Amino acid sequence: MLCSTFSSSFNLKESLATTGEKVCAEVNTCLSQHGFTPLSAERETVLKGQIQAVANSDNTICKLIDSRIQKFLENYLASSHQKSLPAVPGGLGPIQKELEEIAVKYVRLVNYNKMVFSPYYDAVLGKILTKEEYQLAGNTSKGGSLIDCSCIYLL
């Protein structure tokens, strides 16, 4: 299924429906082998529905995985100056290698953007911060670089 995701004819909903069928068949086989009764039609429908629901971007599981991946990338970026790297969040162990490869590329991209575009961001943010500082504290200078937030470099 993963290899075919790059094909122009790939249909996620159809693939998930097929996966649901296969999972139900394997679960029923395993249940029978261990002396249990197979899944009822109602439970099969629920299981297939849960598998197919993964295609929806507002799915709770998708949101949870997405937030864990984003948090990992943020932590990885923050710890790139330290020796200890953040642990992979729960549930993401099977994709740890790929996630760490993406994190390394992400840090490189952020650092490159910071190196190339920081003068532009500093100028823009300097104007914004100067206006806000006048309004809040009447202070126009903080010294040093105006930005230390790596996320801004990905805009």
Image: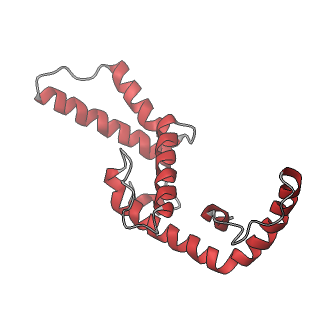
In the picture shown, does residue 110 fall above or below 86? Answer: below
Residue shown at 50%/51% (left/top)?
Answer: 71
Q: Is residue 75 visible?
A: yes
Residue shown at 52%/36% (left/top)?
Answer: 59
Q: Position of residue 82 (x, y in %)?
A: 42, 66
Q: Quadrant of residue 33?
A: top left
Q: Quadrant of residue 125?
A: bottom right
Please state if 111 lies on the left or on the right of 89 as rendered.
Answer: right
Residue shown at 46%/69% (left/top)?
Answer: 81
* Picture quarter with the N terminus: bottom left
Q: Position of residue 104 (x, y in %)?
A: 45, 69
Q: In front: 41, or 79?
A: 79
Please state if 75 lies on the left or on the right of 114 as rendered.
Answer: left
* Picture quarter with the C terminus: bottom right
Q: In front: 28, or 99?
A: 99
Q: Quadrant of residue 127?
A: bottom right
Q: Position of residue 103 (x, y in %)?
A: 46, 64
Please state if 104 lies on the left or on the right of 116 as rendered.
Answer: left
In the picture shown, does residue 77 fall above or below 91? Answer: below
